[in-house]
Amino acid sequence: MNLEPSASTPSLIESPAELLERFESHAPGLVQIKPKVVFMKIEASDPAPVSMKINVPSSGIGSVTLLEASALVSLVKLVKPRKIFEFGTFLGYSTSLLVENSADDCAVYSLDLGDSHVSDKPLAAFAEADLRSDGDINDEYLRGAQGARGPHYTTALSAADRSRLSLLQQDSRKFDPADHGLEGSVDLVFVDGGHDTEIVTIDTANARKMVGDSGVIVFHDFNSNIHSDVTTFVNGLAKHEAIVCIQHTMLAILLVGQAGRDFLKIGA
Ligand SMILES: C[S@@+](CC[C@H](N)C(=O)[O-])C[C@H]1O[C@@H](n2cnc3c(N)ncnc32)[C@H](O)[C@@H]1O
């Protein structure tokens, strides 16, 4: 897995002040920050230690790494969302992070194909080398594993946390935020569903509808060496908008409106 920036990625930003200055003095575009910039923002947001609940992720295929989990949870702490939407529940690892690290009154939605999706191929028939080198095979495996195993990490959530979580089972290409009253009402969206251009384009359009004029949209698999459509798509967005990617992760953050400006100012 390649977690290094592509050749076009600009130089590394080392502090919240430098990040804010970059967006105040230049046109929008793609910037890369060191992970410590996110953690410096956390320190600046609260002088007391900030508690986070992060179980060490499985080293298997398909979920976020420990560093990505830490950064994602930090974004939750910084944005303080009242509503979160996730494309791509998979086994519920990132879903549980989003629920357990958001406020007690934050509603969390996570969408995946669900058990209606039946894989044509048994999971045991996938070779690990193929899963790590071919994006289409990897996606086929993820859909099959999700259908077969379901969001089992979410079963460990407390009853109170579980009551804030809505698990939606639907092909995201057919998803309409208006059906769930979500237009313009979501503060943080995590885009980590299907990885081809069609799905990422549709999921991002719906993410935009959900955040409206203010919010934060986080993409996973930016600069993945197998899901190149995501990288191409996010690089395309960065021609016109502010995108922040985090070094040594596959996270890229689209900052929209006031929530984006507020995020940039923390600790700067
Ligand atoms: C990379 S996994 C998500 C990982 C999860 N966010 C985590 O970090 O633990 C991608 C998920 O997207 C789902 N997916 C793929 N295409 C989809 C579609 N068209 N609609 C909904 N979900 C889809 C797959 O079933 C799979 O579970």
Image (spheres, rainbow, N blue to C red):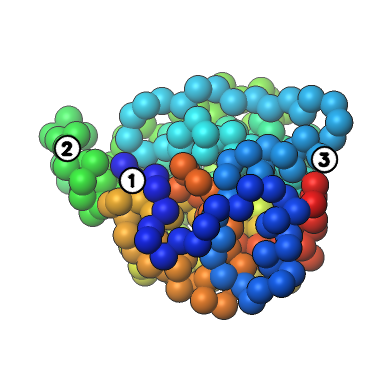
**Which residue is at the far right?**
47
- Between marks 2 and 3, how big is the CA–CA gap? 42 Å
The amino acid type, in three-letter code, at marker 3 is Ser
Give the mark toward the camera: 2 or 3.
3
Give the mark toward the camera: 2 or 1.
1
- Between marks 1 and 3, how big is the CA–CA gap? 31 Å
Q: Is the distance from the Cβ of mark 3 to the nearest ligand 1 atom less than 8 Å?
A: no
* Quadrant of the snapshot with the N terminus: top left
- Identify residue for label 3: 45
Q: In the picture, residue 148 is in which quadrant? A: top left
The amino acid type, in three-letter code, at marker 2 is Ala
Q: Which residue sits at x=50%, y=46%?
A: 247
Q: Secondary structure at mark 1?
A: loop
The amino acid type, in three-letter code, at marker 1 is Asn
Q: Position of residue 228 (x, y in %)?
A: 32, 60
Q: Secondary structure at mark 3?
A: helix
Q: Which residue sits at x=28%, y=52%?
A: 226
Q: Marks 3 and 1: in contact by CB < 8 Å?
A: no
Q: Is residue 103 above or below residue 86?
A: above
Left or right side of 134 for 161 = right
- Identify residue for label 1: 2
Question: Where residue 129 is drawn, which disc sits there?
Answer: 2
Comparing 23 with 92, the one in front is 23
Q: Position of residue 232 (x, y in %)?
A: 38, 67
Q: Position of residue 142 (x, y in %)?
A: 32, 43
**Crowd band around label 1 with a 10 angstrom C-alpha radius: few (<14), some (14–19), many (20+):** some
Q: Is residue 19 above or below residue 73?
A: below
